[in-house]
Image (tube, rainbow, N blue to C red):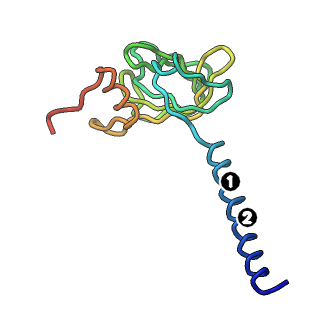
């Protein structure tokens, strides 16, 4: 093998290694991705059973039900559609009716969203960006004009 052939084989080997590393990285990131949906988006979206998604909207008034232990059932709405959610765990202190929320989890076989994490807004002016954008698009939520 000449020097030129050795150099070319090292370069090609390095490029193959980098391509394999990039492919594995993108595959791993794709497996961890959670897609964000509003309740109205779920009617047109095709969500596979067991696929992790983020469901955002407002906690529907009158739907919070405490169950056995730390299990809570409630509905997430965009004021037009709503999705039933169950969550087992400690809810954020600011979780309450008619407040912005993002839940992450999967749909169960009965069509109820089983959340494994719940995020609530953290002050009087903040709304998660995805939730605010979705509610603004439906004409349900307006920003506070007093700022």
Residue 82, given in percent of the width and then of the height, sits at: 46, 15
Q: Which label sits in the foreground, 2 or 1?
A: 2
Numbered-mark total: 2
Image: 2 above or below 13: below
Q: Residue furthest left?
A: 146
Q: Residue furthest right?
A: 1
Residue 35, given in percent of the width and then of the height, sits at: 54, 34
Quadrant including the C terminus: top left
Question: Quadrant location of residue 132?
Answer: top left
Question: According to the image, label 1 marks what residue?
Answer: 23
Query: Residue at coordinates 67% horizontally, 48% vertically from top-left?
Result: 27
Residue 5, given in percent of the width and then of the height, sits at: 78, 80
Q: Is residue 23 left or right of residue 100?
A: right
Asked which secondary structure carries label 2, the reply is helix
Q: Is residue 32 left or right of residue 134?
A: right
Q: Earlier in the sequence, mark 2 or mark 1?
A: 2
Question: According to the image, label 2 marks what residue?
Answer: 16
């Amino acid at each position: 093998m000449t020097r030129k052939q050795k150099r070319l084989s090292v370069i090609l080997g390095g490029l193959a290694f980098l391509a394999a590393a990039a492919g594995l990285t993108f595959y791993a990131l794709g497996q961890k991705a959670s897609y964000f949906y509003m309740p109205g988006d779920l009617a047109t979206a095709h969500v596979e059973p067991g696929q992790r998604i983020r469901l955002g909207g407002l906690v529907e008034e009158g739907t919070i039900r405490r169950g056995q232990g730390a299990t809570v059932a409630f509905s997430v709405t965009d004021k037009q559609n709503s999705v039933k959610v169950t969550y087992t765990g400690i809810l954020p202190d600011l979780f309450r009716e008619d407040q912005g929320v993002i839940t992450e989890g999967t749909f169960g076989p009965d069509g109820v969203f089983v959340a494994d994490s719940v995020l609530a807004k953290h002050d009087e002016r903040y709304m998660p960006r995805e939730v605010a954008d979705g509610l603004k698009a439906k004409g349900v939520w307006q920003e506070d004009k007093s700022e």
